[in-house]
Image (spheres, grey):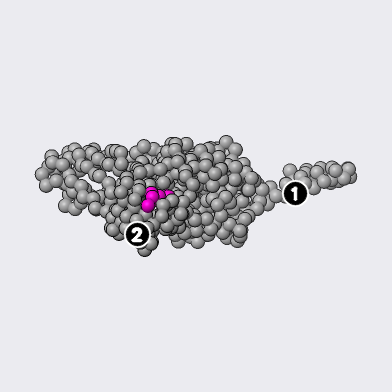
Amino acid sequence: MGHRLLSTMMHRSMATSPASKREIMRFSRIVTGLACAFMLNANAATVEDYMQYLPDGANLALIVQKVGVDTPSIDYHSKQMALPASTMKVITALAALLQLGPEYRFHTQLESKGSISNGTLKGDLVARFGGDPTLTRQDLRNMVAVLKKQGVDHIQGNLVIDTSVFASHDKAPGWPWNDMTQCFSAPPAAAIVDRNCFSVSLYSAQTPGEKAFIRVASFYPVNMFSQVRTLARGSSEAQYCELDVVPGELNRFTLTGCMSQRAEPLPLAFAIQDGASYAGAILKGELQQAGIDYSGHLVRQTLATPPATVLAETQSAPLHDLLKIMLKKSDNMIADTVFRTIGHERFGVPGTWRAGSDAIRQILRQKANIDMGNSIQVDGSGLSRHDLISPDTMMQVLQYIAQNDQQLNYISMLPLAGYDGTLRYRGGLHEAGVDGKVSAKTGSLQGVYNLAGFITTASGKRVAFVQYLSGYAVPPQNFKQRRIPLVRFESRLYKDIYQNY
């Protein structure tokens, strides 16, 4: 009845003016599009039908939209602001490609204003760190070897650790304090060596009540102290026995709490808190190993100085390679050093969190016509609990990526369901039968399970989607099986999207 009435109205109106005819034709196209959308979705469930599988109280914001199409196929609270978690890396990577380019490389240099004469470098040796998240001890060793080949046995000056490429705090606003010492949250400093992460072994004492003891490999320039009490096996205290680590200055750490007796040592890993101090100690050790000493002091330089003569240099892999690792493995260190570097390169100032945030907003608006609106991005990784973005805004980013992928070569960097990265073992997507069909970035925090990316449907169309799921919690007795509701939800949702769009 509705369609017949509409047809009659259109027929009567066609006898009117040309302008009216154009309006009617436009309206007709809209109605036809809506009718097609209805038919395509005729066999798909409603979003509320999928939500029945989620735990009580879970919040969902969802948008599904074909690439190159202006209107979404599914729009469920798409303007609702949410924690993006690691889907924020999608935006960081796009801005990096647009501002820095795929061939951009991070540089680390040994330089000096002095001259080399009779085995002596007469002047300070400056190690200028550029925020390379992939720099290794071996890279520093190789640079020292190059210095040695130039005949340097003695430095008549200071060993200077230059970290002026970045400024302000190395920890972003909104990072939880209890994540700070975990390696996935290692501060993205200017000076990074081996991901600024080190490991130790904690041994329980033979006698209950005595201190456990720590063994740290000698090549880690850190100081670890134990205030950990050993409990007898089966002790009633064990249920609520916790280990804690208290970081101090110059990478001094104290372990506190308690642990039950155990036959094998407990392996632990911690994040370096002072990158400059750590890198300086490692470089000093490598110089000593090569038979190079210095008469001055080990000092830190935070103010930018004019470049001097480069004596040795190392560089990272091209940016596109780093972004691929960042997206596939959800690497926070790469994301946040890239984020700060974008601000540094865009504005010509030391990289800060504020500069990175302002730069990305500006880059997306000017180069991709994407308006971030009231989104909040304070870091590149999505670790911050201050980050906020809507699925609708993220969809703008995805649409731009898909429509410019030939130039960007972006989608290949995303995890591929069932094959690699953080989607290799995504149960819901596997059960949906979409392994190899979904390329998407995951995002997980406490109570948060996000996805943002693309699915190639059974009809051969590429469809973009953003799933922001928060407030996800199960009763304590179900904690070990807490992902079962998620698997049920995602398996049904993405199976229907695959089959019906």
Name the one closer to the observer, 75 or 42. Answer: 75
Task: Judge whether residue 128 can be spotted in this image.
Answer: yes
- Going from N to C along the chain, the mark reached first, 2 or 1, is 1
Q: Label 1: how many residues lie within 10 Å, few (<14), some (14-19) or many (20+)? A: few
In whole angstroms, how far apart are the C-alphas of marks 2 and 1? 83 Å
Residue located beneath label 2 in the image: 118
- Estimate the x, y position of residue 355 in percent, counting from the top left: 52, 40
Magenta part of the protein: which range?
A: 122-129
Name the one closer to the observer, 270 or 208. Answer: 270
- Estimate the x, y position of residue 238 in percent, counting from the top left: 20, 40
Residue positioned most to the left: 207
- Image point 47% across, 56% down: which residue? 322
**Amino acid on which disc 1 is placed:** Arg
**Amino acid on which disc 2 is placed:** Asn
- Image point 56% across, 59% down: which residue? 409
Residue positioned most to the front: 118
The C terminus lies in which quarter of the figure?
bottom right
Q: Secondary structure at mark 1?
A: helix
Foreground label between 2 and 1: 2
Up-down relation of residue 73 to residue 499 (above or below): above
- Estimate the x, y position of residue 218 in percent, counting from the top left: 24, 53
Kindly indicate the quadrant of the structure image that contains residue 477: top left
- Estimate the x, y position of residue 472 in percent, counting from the top left: 43, 41
Residue located beneath label 1 in the image: 29
- Image point 30% across, 49% down: which residue? 295
Q: Is residue 12 magenta?
A: no
Task: Judge whether residue 141 can be spotted in this image.
Answer: no
Up-down relation of residue 316 to residue 298 (above or below): below
Up-down relation of residue 318 to residue 181 (above or below): below
